[in-house]
Image (cartoon, rainbow, N blue to C red):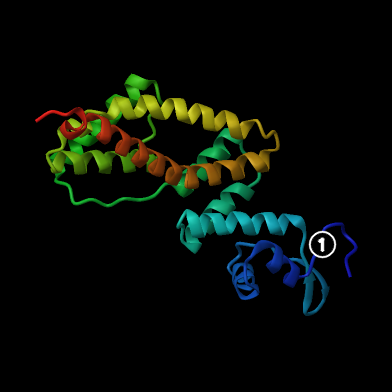
């Protein structure tokens, strides 16, 4: 039996994490969770690191709505040795960026690609067309153009300005943790769950703006 501080059997790991034992075993089989330390052929003990990893897995799957395969990719990016911190952060972000397929015409797609490239030049951002974020932006812009929503597409720089301020704040926050693994996990959770937070806060702000700016609110007839 292991005497390592903080070690626990799978029943305690389940209790403390809130994850059922069969689900933990499934994560072990799928390679999402590292095996525990064997104390006998049929028994293993787990450390605090397993508990933290379980919390991360549940956050990605339950709140981030990532598939098992996508979650495995994210965790592999977090655990991959070597490379600069910036490179590892990029791999993590690639893994958690959603893929969107829209039914847009070729003309709209070409226009969207030009606008996305122009935005990157205006903001001084690195132009990486292999980035999932680049593909996502292009697809969304193309959908707006195809639907005749050019005025909404014209808000792109407003979105970019708000995103720059938020992104710098987020990156500074996770870098302040110091420990590289904690930084990477912060990017995973911050990117995945931050998208959800941003969507919720935006809707609350839109409801407030609507109450203030619609003709009924202003008393106009």
> Dot 1: few (<14), some (14–19), or many (≥20) neighbours within 10 Å?
many
Q: Position of residue 121 (x, y in %)?
A: 33, 22
Q: Position of residue 153 (x, y in %)?
A: 22, 33
Identified at 60% across, 47% down, the residue is 78
Identified at 61% across, 64% down, the residue is 31
Q: Nearest the camera: 221 or 55? A: 221
Which residue, as the protein is rendered here, is positioned at the far bottom?
42
Residue holding disc 1:
7
Q: Nearest the camera: 195 or 145? A: 195
Residue 217, quarter of the rendered image: top left
Answer above or below: position of 100 versus 46.
above
Whether residue 82 appears in this view of the structure is: no
Q: Is residue 74 left or right of residue 205?
A: right
Whether residue 29 appears in this view of the structure is: yes
- For the C terminus, which image quadrant? top left
Q: Position of residue 103 (x, y in %)?
A: 18, 51
Q: Dot 1: what SS?
A: loop
Labels in figure, total: 1
- For the N terminus, which image quadrant? bottom right
Answer above or below: position of 93 versus 33.
above
Identified at 49% across, 61% down, the residue is 69
Residue 41, quarter of the rendered image: bottom right
Q: Nearest the camera: 43 or 111? A: 43
Residue 72, quarter of the rendered image: bottom right
Which residue, as the protein is rendered here, is positioned at the far front?
219
Q: Position of residue 26 (x, y in %)?
A: 59, 72
Answer above or below: position of 19 versus 80.
below
Which residue, as the protein is rendered here, is positioned at the far left?
221
């Amino acid at each position: 039996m292991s005497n390592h501080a903080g070690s626990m059997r799978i029943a305690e790991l389940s209790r403390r994490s809130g994850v059922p034992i069969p689900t933990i075993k499934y994560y072990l089989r799928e390679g999402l969770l590292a095996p525990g330390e064997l104390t006998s052929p049929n028994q293993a003990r787990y450390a605090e690191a397993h508990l933290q990893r379980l919390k991360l897995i549940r956050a990605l799957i339950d709140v981030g709505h990532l598939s098992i395969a996508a979650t495995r990719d994210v965790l592999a990016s977090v655990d991959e040795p070597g490379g600069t911190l910036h490179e590892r952060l990029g791999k993590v972000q690639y893994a958690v960026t959603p893929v969107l397929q829209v039914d847009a015409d070729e003309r709209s797609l070409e226009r969207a690609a030009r606008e996305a490239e122009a935005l990157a030049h205006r903001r001084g951002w690195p132009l990486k067309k292999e980035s999932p974020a680049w593909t996502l932006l292009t697809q969304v812009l193309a959908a707006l153009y195809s639907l005749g929503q050019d005025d909404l597409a014209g808000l792109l720089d407003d979105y970019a300005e708000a995103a720059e301020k938020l992104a710098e704040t987020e990156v500074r926050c996770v870098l302040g943790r110091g420990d590289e693994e904690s930084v990477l996990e912060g990017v995973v959770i911050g990117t995945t769950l931050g998208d959800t937070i941003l969507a919720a806060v935006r809707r609350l702000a839109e409801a407030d703006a609507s109450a203030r700016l619609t003709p009924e609110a202003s008393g106009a007839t």
